[in-house]
Image: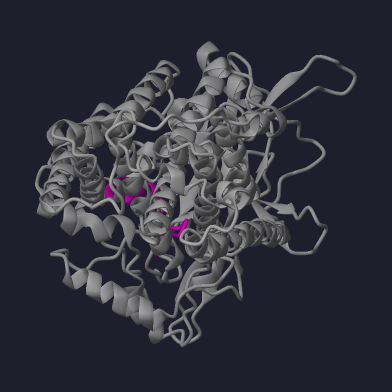
Amino acid sequence: MGKPTRESELDRNPILIYALCLAFLHISSQLPSLSLSLRSEAQKTNQKKEKTAAARKTAAMGGVPGRAAAWLLFALLLSSSAHSFYLPGVAPRDFTTGEELTVKVNKLSSTKTQLPYDYYYLKYCKPTKILNSAENLGEVLRGDRIENSVHKFRMREEEPCKVACKLTLDAESAKNFKEKIDDEYRVNMILDNLPVAVLRQRRDGSPSTTYEHGFRVGFKGNYAGSKEEKYFINNHLSFRVMFHKDELTDTARIVGFEVTPNSIKHEYKEWDPKNPQVTTCNANTKNLVQGSTVPQEVDTDKEVVFTYDVSFKESDIKWASRWDTYLLMNDDQIHWFSIINSLMIVLFLSGMVAMIMMRTLYRDIANYNQLETQDEAQEETGWKLVHGDVFRAPINPGLLCVYVGTGVQIFAMALVTMIFALLGFLSPSNRGGLMTAMVLLWVFMGLFAGYSSSRLYKMFKGTEWKKTTLKTAVMFPGILFAVFFVLNALIWGERSSGAVPFGTMFALVCLWFGISVPLVFVGSYLGFKKPPLEDPVKTNKIPRQIPEQAWYMKPVFSILIGGILPFGAVFIELFFILTSIWLNQFYYIFGFLFIVFVILLVTCAEITIVLCYFQLCSEDYHWWWRSYLTAGSSALYLFLYSVFYFFTKLEITKLVSGILYFGYMIIISYAFFVLTGTIGFYACFWFVRKIYSSVKID
C-alpha cells in the first residue's frame, strides 16, 4: 500500500494554531512547514528507485543542486524545533494496483467575476459526509476550499461508465447553474496534489500540448432550428490518469490528471438506486453512445444523471517533472525581450551616473579650491552652495521615517521570499505556500522596519521615538487591513468562498499585534541605542533662499518623470504577474522575476541619483521627500497600467468584481510605492553624504 504523507499540525488545524500566535517560538518552529518543501526527504525516497530525481522546475533559469538544497534545509531544521515531516503532496507517493485513489474537489473559479465558490454551492453529487481538507493560511486567503467527492478510482483499474448520482434541479439550483455557466465558471479537482486539467493546443501551433486548469461547469447553445439560447451542463466526465511505473516494484506514481467534459442527457430503462445503469453509456466499449444522445439541459425540475469514466495511461514523465506541462510557457521569448529592454535602460542610467560621479568627485571637487573664472564658478559650484542646508531636516520627518522603515520591511520580505522561491521551496505544487511565506516573512521583518526608522529619526534629532515606532508598526498594515476588510465584506455579500473567515482574520490580527508590533519596537529600541549618524557638513541656522526653478525642475514634473524609467524596466514582467493573479495561471518563473527585481532596484537608485544631482545643482536642497517620491511615482504608472489591463485583457462585468480588482491593485500599487520610494531615498541619501563628505567646507 502507498505511504500517505503526514500532515503538520498547522495543515490540520491552521486557525487554532494561528489564534495562538502570541507564542513566538511555536510560530517560528512552524515556519519551515509553511514555506519550505522538504525536498531532502523526497530525494531519499527517490534514490532507491530513480537515480536522478530532478528538482521541480521552479524557474526558467533552472533549479538548485539537490545536495546544496538538502544541506540548506538541514541547517534550517537545526535552527528550529520542528520535527521532520512531509508537506502533503510534496513528497512522492507510490500506489499499488487496485489501491484506492482519492479525488478531492476545490473551488469553482471564474476569470470573469474573480469570486471563487465552494464546489457544493452548486447542486452536484455529495458524499455521505463532506470532509474539509485542512488548508494552510495561504490557501484560505486564496479562497481554496478542498473537500472530498463521490468520485472513487482504483489505481490502474479502468472504470467504463460509473453513475455518480441522479438529481432533480429545483428553481434555485437551476438558477445557480445558469449564473455560473454565464460567468464561465470552471470546476477544479485534485488527485495526488495534481489539479485536473483540460488539454488544449499551443497558440504557436507546436505539437506539444498545454493545459487549461479545471473544466467548464457547462455551456450555452441552441437546438437545431431554434434561436432560443439554452443552458447545458457538463454531467459526464472522462478522466484520464497518467502514471509512471516502477519496473522493480510494480508500483506507480501519478504524473498527470486530465478530464474531457461532456454534456449528455442520459437515458435509463429502470432506475435501481443500488446499481444504477444508463443506456446512453456503453459499459463494454467504455464509450458514450454517440448520435442518439442530446446534451443535458439545465432548467427547473430537470432530472440530471451525473456519470464519469476513468482510464489509465502509462507515461514516460517522471514524478519530478510532472508539473512541467502545467507550467509550460507559451511566450518565454517575451521574457528575454523584457530582460534586454530593462538592461538597456540600466546601461543608459549607469552611464549617466558614472558621468556625474566622475564629474562630481574628480572635476568639481578638484576645482573647488582653484576656481579659474567667474563663469566656471557659477557652473561648477551650484551644489556646493547649499552645503549649509542640504542636511536640514525635512517637513514631517517622522512620517518620512515611518515610510522608509516600512519600505525596508517590504524589501526584506520580497527579497527573502524570492530567494526561497528560486531555491524551489515555494513551487506551485505547495498550494498557498507563497502567500503563507509572504505573510509570515512580513511579520518577522518588522525588526528591520523599527531599526531603520529609529536610526533615521534619531539623525533628525527627533524625541518622540515611541510615537514614530508605533506609526511604523501600525500605519501601513492598518491601511492595508482597512481596504482588505471592506473588500472582504463585499465578498461575504456575494456568498463567495473567497471571503476570509473570521477565525483567519483574527489570526492575522494576532500575527500583526502579537509578533510584528513587538518586533518593530525591539528593532526601534536597538536602533535608538546606536549613536546618531553625523552629518558630513554643518547646517546653517538660517535657511537659504531657493532661487526660482526652471519649469523642468519643478517638483511635480521631475517626480513624475522619475517614475517612468523604473516602471519601464518592469512593465513587461508585470503583464505576466497580473495574468497569473487575475487569469488563473501559475506563476513560477522566479529566475526572470529575480533579475527584473534587481534591475528595478538599480533603476530606482540611478534615476533618483541623477535627478537629485540636477536638483542640488539648481540650488534646491529639499531633496529628502523629493528623492522618495521620485522613485515612488513609478507606482502611479503601475496603477494606470492596471487600469489599461482591466479594460483590454479582462472581461469583468460585475460591479463587485470591478471593485475587488481595483481595490487589490490599489493595495499592490501602494506597496510598490513604499518599496521603490525607499530604494530611491537610500540611494540619494548615500549619494548626498558621499559628495558632501568629499569636499572641504570653509
Q: Position of residue 661 (x, y in %)?
A: 53, 28
Position of the N terminus by quadrant: bottom left
Magenta range is: 425-440
Q: Nearer the viewer, residue 129 or 180?
A: 180
Left or right of residue 13: residue 195: right
Query: Residue at coordinates 37% horizontally, 54% vertically from top-left?
Result: 689
- In this view, 140 is above or below 433: above
Note whether residue 619 is visible: yes
- In this view, 514 is above or below 61: above
Query: Residue at coordinates 33% horizontally, 23% vertically from top-left?
Result: 482
Query: Residue at coordinates 35% horizontally, 51% vertically from top-left?
Result: 413
Q: Position of residue 646 (x, y in %)?
A: 64, 29
Query: Residue at coordinates 47% horizontally, 80% vertically from top-left?
Result: 53
Note whether residue 323 is visible: no
Which residue, as the protein is rendered here, is positioned at the far right? 225
State the image quarter where residue 269 is shown.
Answer: top right
